[in-house]
Image (cartoon, rainbow, N blue to C red):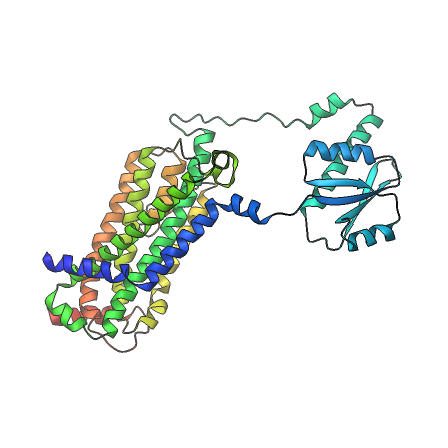
Amino acid sequence: MNKFFIVLFQTYLNRLKSKAFIITTVMTLLLIFLITNISTIINTFDSSESDRVGVIDTGTFYSSLEKQINMMDAEIVLEKFDGTEEEAEKAIEQGELDSYLILEENEAEEPSGVYKAETVAEQVTPQVLETALQQMKNTVAAEKAGVTQEQLNQIDQPVQFEKVALEKGAKTEDELNQARVFVYVLLFVIYFSVIFYGNMVAVEVATEKSSRVMEILISSVSPVKQMFGKILGIALLGLTQYAIIIASGYLFMQMQEDSLSETGFLSFLDFSNISASLIVYAIVFFMLGYLLYATILAMVGSLVSRAEEVQQMIMPVQLLIIIAFFIAMFGLSTPSATFVTISSYIPFFSPVVMFLRVGMLSIPFWEVALSLTLLVGAIVLFGIMGAKVYRGGVLMYGKSSSLKDIGKALKLSKREQ
């Protein structure tokens, strides 16, 4: 057992001190800092004043437009411009105006406008003006039809529509919305973690093979201890990195103003209604998903002789992860679909798809237990098979072209026993 822990902590410490780990961790922390402070950063650099829009009114709609813009509380300052279009263009060139609007009355005696600026790449100001003109047009049309303002407001009121679940124990709409965001975030975490840390396991094995020390290691440490020592060493590295990221993210969010947490960019991260069981399921499926794919990738990594060949060999395994991810993305909108249900029992897909179903639906515990049993069984199966392939694969040198070399590794493993 001492040899197992030696392999585990050696793998952990080597990766912990590596430049790649330090750089990725620092970059992730910088990204989280930018996300949690995005509102402050935008306000700091966005020192521009409100857009000044000159209005050339050929009709009698300027006062109505100004009133509508004020009601919309938009960052636009309207200035009635009595000159010609040529003079308005000169005003833009001289910086007196940012743009101008030709406000006209069409054949139906309704307002219409032509917006002109140096560039129309900016979308906010013209959209606000268009919305204001649309409201004015609706008001004029309603007055012509004899519809009062109160009646028009009543017509514009959204329909009352409520969704009620009849199934006993089903989640409410608010619970589903929070669960959907939580599941969405965790799906990305599981997906990228399995790919990133799983690939790290494969590269770790291939790197030791290229250094020609594998023959010594395999003779002193059993293949099972060596393989799972590396797998759990990388897992411990991942937990360390996530602990740093979560702790830093929490501190960054605590530094924010209350207004930003309630109405700002991070307001959608309200997980107050998330159950503790869902968090436990997230951890369980995350760890089991990592163990499954890391075991397979360690087995595949033992077949190559150079780290440069790893990417080609692990591509089929990555495709399985990608398929699982896309099934889960589809399942966010239709979690009860038949093929989503079936795929949740397939061990390659269950870490993300069954977790999706647990988060979005009220499914009986036996379904989750069955999925977990199949997943654990697959880990044990690939662990036994992987240890045999690992023992023979690490002694195979030369270019490995395909997964067919698994058979060669198994034969070599039998000779070494």
- Quarter holding the C terminus is bottom left
The picture places residue 270, in percent across and down from the top left corner, at 44, 35
Nearest the viewer among 14 and 184 is 14
- Quarter holding the N terminus is bottom left
Nearest the viewer among 179 and 328 is 179
Q: From the viewer's perspective, is residue 189 above or below residue 275? A: below
Nearest the viewer among 331 and 57 is 57
Q: From the viewer's perspective, is residue 181 above or below residue 17? A: above
**Residue plotted at (71% across, 41% down):** 76
The picture places residue 255, in percent across and down from the top left corner, at 43, 40
Classify residue 372 by image quadrant.
top left
**Residue plotted at (27% across, 61% down):** 15
The picture places residue 184, in percent across and down from the top left corner, at 43, 44
> Left or right: where does residue 79 sit relative to residue 293?
right
> Left or right: where does residue 130 sit relative to residue 193?
right
**Residue plotted at (16% across, 73% down):** 215
Classify residue 110 by image quadrant.
top right
Q: From the viewer's perspective, is residue 285 above or below residue 141? A: below
**Residue plotted at (73% across, 40% down):** 77
> Left or right: where does residue 200 sit relative to residue 272?
left
Q: Can residue 162 be seen in this view?
A: yes
| Total numbered circles | 0
The picture places residue 98, in percent across and down from the top left corner, at 74, 49
Q: Is residue 137 visible?
A: no
